[in-house]
Image (cartoon, grey):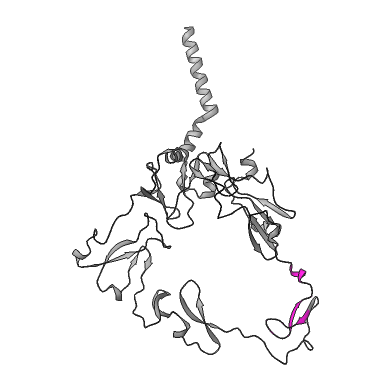
Amino acid sequence: MIKMKRLASNWFLLVLVYYCCVGPDRVIVDALYKCETLDYNVCSASYPNCTPLILKSCCPGGVGLCVDIETYITYTTNEKSATPVACAIDPQTEITYELNTEFPNYVGYDVFPIPNATCESIGCEAKGLACKLIGRTDCDSKSPCCPPQPVCVEDDSITKHLELNGEKFCSLPCPEGHICRYIAETQTCLPLSCKYLNCSQGTECQELVGVGVVSCFKTIDFLDDPALTCETKVCPDTFECQKGVFSNADCVPVNIDLLGTQFNCSLCPVDWRCDTFGWGGLCIEWHPFSNGGGIECDGDACLFQQFCNTTTNRCEFTSCELNNPCPANMECIQYLPTHPRVCATLNVVPYSSIPETLIPFSERFNR
């Protein structure tokens, strides 16, 4: 009888410990936690429930997938291949990533084998069709996960356009020195250089940077009137008349300090990146050409100024609280330990906001 009472008492204590320390609510939260729905910032803040899995993307700009800690450990500890063995698409960003090891059956991401389709394998010729290679990405990707996709098209496709995966192929026949481009959903032949374009009076030919064509733009008329001189020009207070870029009699500030002086990048710590914003600026703890001196961390190489945190097993930057390198009149900002420190002038700080979903750094990572 005494043994029965002791067993009952022990069982009660176990149940009490479960509800106090773990509790049914914790089980429900874990079951409902969907890491694949989180963006990079929220994913980093959700550690250890979720953590970013840094992967190489087909085009520059991808940071990786947000996975649960079990998936992260499985992927990072498995033996890795020198070349990708599979690919994964993030449904939130539609970015394709390379996988160099066996990827767990993780709900939320489209995992597929390395594409190997060719014009021969899809049999266009046997169908009486021609084969056309269609790019899968916006960049000229060399990744095996994003090779050009072979598509069977009709032989007269030169005079038609295909619309595949949202990409339009302009095929209007154009004269020499012109190229076909879509303008407001209409195929149009545009000149490649000013040699093939006659602009009307009051306009001039200029290149559309990044498009590869030229167009006519309104000419900016400068008021270069010989009769306009500073002898008759009346300027407001704190301005004086001088010959400027717009006319022979421009009103310019007497003291340039009234408009502020350009930010001095020499204020930034050594080797930090400097971005100027008028008379304000940012100093960023970033050096794209340095890999951190070869510091390895959990199979990866840390970046410039990063160290390996053996507790979280990831590369991190020193926090602003532990070491504030910013000069006077500049604020030290840091979103996450994996993010570099940023020194911002006080006139830039109000425009540098932290996502509301992130907990302040000092409350989350108190070391």
Horizontal relation, residue 105 to residue 118: left or right: right
Considering depth in this image, is 290 or 111 the residue closer to the camera?
290
Residue at the location (40% across, 40% down)? 79
Magenta range is 240-263
The x, y position of residue 167, in whole percent, is 38, 66
Residue at the location (71% across, 92% down)? 226
The x, y position of residue 136, in whole percent, is 37, 61
Horizontal relation, residue 230 to residue 145: left or right: right
Residue at the location (54% across, 90% down)? 201
Residue 201, compared with residue 185, is above or below; it is below
Residue at the location (18% across, 64% down)? 126
| Magenta run includes residue 315 | no
| Magenta run includes residue 249 | yes
The x, y position of residue 301, in whole percent, is 51, 46
Point out the image quarter for the C terminus.
top right
Residue 183, compared with residue 35, is above or below; it is below
